[in-house]
Amino acid sequence: MATPVIPDLRVTYFLDITSSWCWWAEKAWTDLKQGFGEQVTFDWKIALMDATAFPVSREQCDWFYRRSGLAMRSAYALNSGWWEAGLGQYLAPNQMAEAARSLGFGDDRVRLALARSPEIEERVREDTRSFHALAVTQRPTFLLESRIGDRAVFSGIARTEPLRAAIVALLEDAAAYAAHAAHLGDPPTR
């Protein structure tokens, strides 16, 4: 029986379901998963936006949507119909994604899923604390961590190219370490 290969790299995608930039980053996320498949472990975590990250009116939300849509050169506009005055944080859709994951739907379709509970809220808040520990403010944020301890954080990036370049570099470094170990073994302990 073959030994399972443990990927040399883990990519964590921090997102808020209601973030337009996270919506635009979904293409990059899909491209990366298709391009690196078994070489990389991919995971997502919720990073709740606080009240200061949300628009103050539907008109402002539309303005942000037009800006992000033009920046991403989208052929369509996002719909601000979900926006509600005074909420300050949209916990329910993010809890729904976590609830679906706990039910075994851990792929990306989970972010369209269902349910909520105190345990799910705690996981969402814990993932949000992990996001804040990165000392970044923008969503999407991608955290790339290799087995050899290399780490890259991309905050606010919604395009495939810079993420792909970093993944390739981290994988090449991990492969170089593995080749070195295959030829020379582990480092001396004294």
Image: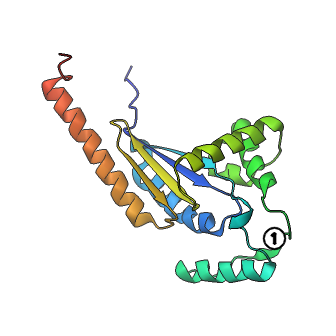
> Which quadrant of the figure contains the C terminus?
top left
Q: In which quarter of the view is residue 145 placed?
A: top left
Q: Is residue 155 left or right of residue 9?
A: right
Display coloring: rainbow
The number of callouts visible is 1
x%, y% of residue 124? 70, 44
Q: Is residue 134 left or right of residue 69?
A: left
Choose between 168 and 48: the one closer to the eye: 48
Q: Is residue 24 left or right of residue 5?
A: right
Q: Secondary structure at mark 1?
A: loop
Q: Which residue is mark 1?
A: 83
> Type of residue at label 1?
Trp
x%, y% of residue 57? 80, 78
Work out whether 126 lies above or below 71. Answer: above
Determine the residue positioned at 21% across, 17% down: 189
Q: In the image as oriented, which residue stretches furthest toward the left? A: 183
Determine the residue positioned at 81% across, 52% down: 92
Work out whether 32 lies above or below 38. Answer: below
x%, y% of residue 115? 83, 45
Work out whether 40 lies above or below 168. Answer: above
Q: Is residue 34 left or right of residue 177?
A: right
Q: In which quarter of the view is residue 165 placed?
A: bottom left
Determine the residue positioned at 39% across, 43% down: 39
> Which quadrant of the figure contains the N terminus?
top left
x%, y% of residue 97? 72, 48
- Mark 1 Cα within 10 Å, few/some/many (few <14, many 20+)? some
Work out whether 3 lies above or below 132. Answer: above
